[in-house]
Amino acid sequence: MSFPQHRPRRLRSTPALRRMVAEYRVHPSELILPAFIREGLTEPSPILSMPGVVQHTTDSLRRAAAEAVQRGVGGIMLFGIPEHRDATGSAGIDPDGVLNRAIADVRAEVGDALVVMSDVCLDEFTDHGHCGVLAEDGSVDNDETLALYAQMAVAQANAGAHVLGPSGMMDGQVAVIRQALDEAGHRDTVVLAYAAKYASAFYGPFREAVDSQLTGDRRTYQMDAANRREAILEVELDIEEGADMVMVKPAMSYLDILADVAAMSPVPVAAYQISGEYAMIEAAAANGWIDRRRAIEESVLGIKRAGAQMILTYWASELALWLDESHS
Ligand code: PBG
């Protein structure tokens, strides 16, 4: 009886062998921690649908940023929740607005030790919860919104953000932001475009995280889950418009898109493991239905393997700690 010469199990026989032949590994520097700051809080406020994630105060945000630095995390992506909202999201542009102040605070805390990123989008700041301003018929007005994104981007760059993440899916947003940044002298501010962002049910917990005012959905501007080819067009347009990095979002239900984008993109590719992906794993683990740590590690490794060079995940700091343990 002859056996084939290749017996793949040979390379799986010890942890050291498995580690040595591993094709992919996640490094803390590739992880980006999304974080929420809420104006007017005196204590961090738990987000019930994202156990372990909070809306931060200024102090707790600074501590979370310092912890991320200590653990070797690559970056932090900031979202702000203002006390007052209006039709045009003016608190997002105000230099004294909660997000712009948080950017400056975090920069003061971490300097250049952590890549400080911020969300360029109006949905947290508008009283209707849409990512742009509304036309008279109630639709989201693309070009009126672009002018506001340009101002918001400059305000965030002035506050000290290293990287801006336009996430509103307005056509032409990257070009307008790039031009505004250059004109304001922010030539080195990086644009990470949410290029292929899908309208997803998995954003559910994020709505609680930012106290979203949205009724309805974002299907007239975010991509349709049925479309694969269109993601390439979105990425090509954003790169033409000057995006320094591109993102696919969500991650786990869109690994095919991520692989497609990774295969064609000449610029670094990020993926965002979003709130609902976090919530699903935490909920199953809390019920004892899956092994929490293994599920988290496997999910992030899957995103890496599909082609993400950078991964936004609410587990960034915890995962970085585990990665550190497993290397030592
Ligand atoms: C828009 C934005 C959203 C998320 C990141 N940026 C919400 C949306 O598009 O509905 C979702 C992130 C998550 O679900 O973790 N500002």
Image (cartoon, grey):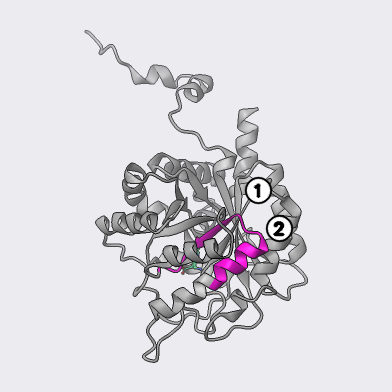
Which residue was labeled with disc 2? 106
- Nearer the N terminus, badge 1 or badge 2? 2
Residue 298 seen from this side: yes
Q: Position of residue 255 (x, y in %)?
A: 36, 49
Q: Quadrant of the N terminus?
A: top left
- Judge left or right: residue 244 versus residue 220: right
Taking 42 as reference, is 326 above or below it? above
**Magenta segment boundaries in residue numbering:** 151-169
Q: CA distance from mark 1 to mark 2?
A: 9 Å
Element assignment for label 2: helix
Amino acid residing under circle 2: Val
Q: Which residue is mark 1?
A: 114
Magenta stretch encompasses residue 52: no
Q: The C terminus lies in which quarter of the figure? A: top right
Residue 155 within the segment the image draws in magenta: yes
Q: In the image shown, does 327 or 312 lie closer to the viewer?
A: 312
Q: Is mark 1 within 8 Å of ligand 1?
A: no
| x and y percentages locating residue 319 in the rendered image | 59, 44
At mark 1, the secondary structure is: loop
